[in-house]
Amino acid sequence: MTDPTPVPHFFRLYRGSDTVEKAMTRHRRYLWSYLSLKQGMKILDIGSGFGTAAIDLSHYAGVSVIGIENDSFKVEQSTNVALSGDIQDRVSFVKESLQTTPSFLDVYEQVQYVLKPGGKVASYDWCWTNMFDCNNPDHCRLANLVEGSTNIGHRDTDGRSIQRAPHALESTGFRVLAHNDLTGSEKSSIIPWYIHLRDIVGNSHLPRWAFIDSSPQYSSQARYSFGLTKDAASILQQAGGFKLFTPMAMFVAQKIVQ
């Protein structure tokens, strides 16, 4: 199972000759490398979007994938791509309601219910970093702005901390195999994830509450962040610049066999 929380995508992009397409594929496959995938396995992709990851996963590992998405248009488009590639026997998409949940505990309780014993879950999630102070009013105000301007839903400030997710996994019957903030190991060769949001914030032709689409007027990485408003992009840029927020908290866990 991959990605229990559907959100706009961010990833590590290296300076120089790296491309967005290569970086996005590398980002997905790095997560998949923790799943011990074998040909013929069945994978559930929650929040499958336009099906890019599900189709890539099927080709990459020879697995069968069911993508779950709450947008009928995306389900239709994904299904058409699978049909055109003649892989509909291995990749399918269904429409299901995906609602934001109030805590990591609620998320992983639902995941635990659908996984068989020994099954694994891997995800990138949006979290407050270790530098976030729940007792700092400025940090809490920024957290409310992030949640209010994006589609991630509202939680208690401590409920989205990067320390909370591993505890929630263990409390719901999982053994944590790996957890890491991929933005916490940024090197000078890596472009900070929030830098490209300047293209959105600095565009004087874009209204404050306009939704970002895949128009070529934005940088190639900014186009992967569609669904954000200009205000949301500005707030995320601030949260990232202060190192209080990460969209690349990685968690991998295995359902304990009773």
Image (tube, helix red, strand yellow):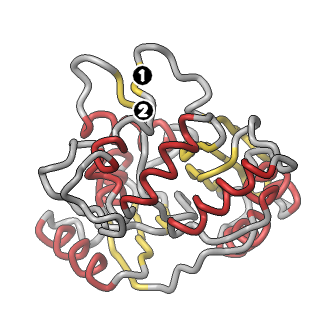
Q: Earlier in the sequence, mark 2 or mark 1?
A: 2
Residue located 72% across and 65% down the image: 108
Is residue 130 among the parts visible in the rendering? yes
Residue type highlighted by circle 2: Arg
Q: Which residue is disc 2 drawn over?
A: 12
Q: Is residue 69 above or below residue 140?
A: below
Q: Which picture quadrant has residue 76? A: bottom left
Describe residue 7's horizontal placement relative to residue 137 as left or right.
Answer: left
Asked if residue 256 shows in the view, the reply is no
Classify mark 1: residues with Cα within 10 Å, few (<14), some (14-19) or many (20+): some
Q: Is residue 158 left or right of residue 19?
A: right
Q: As drawn, is 223 to the left or to the right of 95?
A: left
Secondary structure category for the residue under label 2: loop
Quarter of image, res 198: top left
Mark 2 touches mark 1? (CB < 8 Å): yes
Q: With respect to residue 65, does 75 lie above or below? A: below
The amino acid marked with disc number 1 is Ile
Q: Nearer the viewer, residue 64 or 110?
A: 110
Q: In front: 202, or 34?
A: 202
**Where is residue 78 drawn, in percent x and y?**
25, 71
Q: Residue at x 79, y 52 (%)?
A: 137
Where does residue 65 sit, x and y in percent of width and height? 40, 65
Q: Residue most toward the top? A: 188
The x, y position of residue 31, in whole percent, is: 51, 42
Q: Residue at x 59, y 23 (%)?
A: 185
Quadrant of the frame with the C terminus: bottom right
Q: Which residue matches tag 1?
A: 190
Q: Residue at x 74, y 63 (%)?
A: 104
